[in-house]
Every structure is written in structure tokens, then in C-alpha cells.
Amino acid sequence: MALEKATGHDKKLQDRLIGSGDVPRHIAIIMDGNGRWAQKRGLPRIAGHHEGVNSVRDIVEACGQLGVKYLTVYAFSTENWKRPQEEVSLLMRLLLKALRDEKDRLHQNEVKLKVVGDIAALPQDVQDELLDGIEKMKDNKGLTLILALSYSGRWDITNAIQRMYDEIRSGSLKKEQITQELITSYLATKDFPDPDLLIRTSGEFRISNFLIWQIAYSELFISQEFWPSFRRKQLYEAVSNFQRRERRFGMVSEQLNKNESSGLDPLRGMERFLKSASKS
């Protein structure tokens, strides 16, 4: 079954976005504000997490319709284990239920499921459900949905360094071989491009230990909406804002314009510029 198509006014908004500029290839989202959304409504914090699942569903669908290739959502950080045990247990049960409820829908819409993080720290039934979903959706050709679970940027980099150290000790890796590209290849996200756009909800100006290596050149968008209120309308606003940015990757506008006129990708252009500068 193909991805459900947008209709009516929503389709017009999507067509306008697609025609206005580049749609981010990879969007990453820090989903923040579930508890505060619930508290403002006199509801228990878990109610915000429940409603947040509906936001994930809508954003996944809208990203697929826009042609976004990768969507990474910060679902549970390594620091979240420090929350009260009752809340952590409720979150794990909600995660398990969401995986079971959404798995068939994701599969029907050609979504490919991936996970990054310390998966072994999750309850066994959650691990089993994740692995089942990954296996079921492994051949899908649509949006790749990446769940960051028991994940943090520092955990990711520390884990990469530990693995490199083991290889240096064994003699299979030399210090001189360590480059930025090599480090990237040891990260949990090695199979995915770096995010073009990082969205954070709830109005907080923090990256909260999320993809701290990978977002070096990501564009940032801070939404004032709490995550349970963040839907495709707010996503379109973020994408439209992204399209108005000039992504210079450390270069100046004149260099970018030269690269664009020659058909050279900005990242490749930056690499070429740095190499030529190092020789001079």
C-alpha cells in the first residue's frame, strides 16, 4: 500500500513548500513539553505523552508526503532514566503500546524503522517489539523513521571512542587513521546523513545532548508549541523557515554561489576549499 496522499488545503500547502525550495532530506526533532502540556490542562503528565504519540503519527505522515527521506525523533534519552521510576515504567508501557499499534500502519505506508541508542537498556518486551518492527519494515522504500531511544550524544561519542580504542590496542587501527569521517563511521547514526534541520518544541533553547556531533551544520528551529500541540502546520512553518536560510557550511556567500553555478554540492565545495587552503 502506498503512502496516503494529502488532500485539499493540506495538499496545496505541501505543493507550495515543495515548489519553494529544497525540502530537508533529514529532519531531527527534540520532542519536548509533554508534561507541561498536560499540567496546563490539569492532567497527569502521562496524558501529555499519550497525546504526543498522536503528534508523532501526524509528523511521520506529513514528512513522508513532503518527500523527507529521514526523520529522527528523540523519544527517550539516557538522562530520562533518572526520572521517577513510576513515570519511566509508564513511558516504557506507552512505547510498547505505540509500537504495537503503529507497526502495521507504518509498514503499509512504506516507512522503514530504525533505532539508535543503548537498546539493551530497554525492557525485553520493548526490545522484541522494536526488532520485530525493524525486520518487518526492512525492505520498505519510503521515509526512514529513526527512534532515538536510551540515546544521548555523549553516549554515542563515548561508545565510538571505546570501540576505536579497542581496535588501536589490537593493532587494526592507527592513530594517524583517525579522521572526522572515521569517527562518524563509528557512531550509531553512521548509516544516515547528518540532519539538515533540527526542530525543538516547547520554546527551550537547548540541544539536550542530542546528536551533538551530527548537528554541527544543522539549521535550528525552535517552536513555542509543546510537543503534543506540534502538528503538520508547525512542521510546514519549520520547513518554510529552513528554505529561507543560506547554508554556508563555514564558507561565504560568494563561494556558495560559485559552487551552485558549477553544480557543486556545498559540502563537497567546502571540502575542496579546505583542501586547497591547507596546501597554500
Image (tube, grey):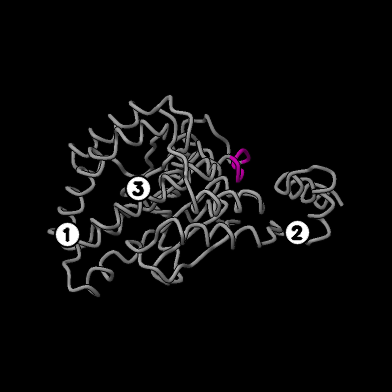
Question: In this orientation, which residue lies closer to the viewer: 159 or 40?
Answer: 40
Secondary element type, mark 1: helix
Q: Which mark is residue 87?
A: 1
Q: Quadrant of residue 262?
A: top right
Lower sequence index among marks 1 and 2: 1
Label 3 crowd bin: few (<14), some (14–19), many (20+), radius 10 Å: some
Q: CA distance from mark 1 to mark 2?
A: 46 Å
Q: Is residue 125 above or below residue 257?
A: above
Ranked by sequence position, the earlier of labels 2 and 3 is: 3
Q: Position of residue 74 (x, y in %)?
A: 38, 53
Q: Nearer the viewer, residue 55 or 205?
A: 55
Q: Earlier in the sequence, mark 1 or mark 3?
A: 3
User: What amino acid does circle 2 point to?
Assistant: Met
Q: Nearer the viewer, mark 2 or mark 3?
A: 3
- Mark 1 and mark 3: Cα distance apart in space: 22 Å
* Mark linked to residue 277: none
Q: Is 17 situated above or below 177?
A: below
Measured along the vertical axis of the image, is residue 96 above or below residue 224? above
Disc 2/disc 3 C-alpha distance (Å): 37 Å
Q: Residue at x 39, y 37 (%)?
A: 114
Label 1 or label 2, whichever lies nearer to me, is 1
- In the picture of the structure, the residue carrying the numbered disc 3 is 57
What residue appears at the point 20 percent right and 65 percent down from the top-left corner?
45
Left or right: where does residue 117 sit relative to residue 11? left
Q: Which stretch appears magenta?
A: 176-181
Residue behind mark 2: 251
Direction right: furthest residue: 280
**Disc 3, SS:** helix
Residue at point 31%, 49% (across, down): 150
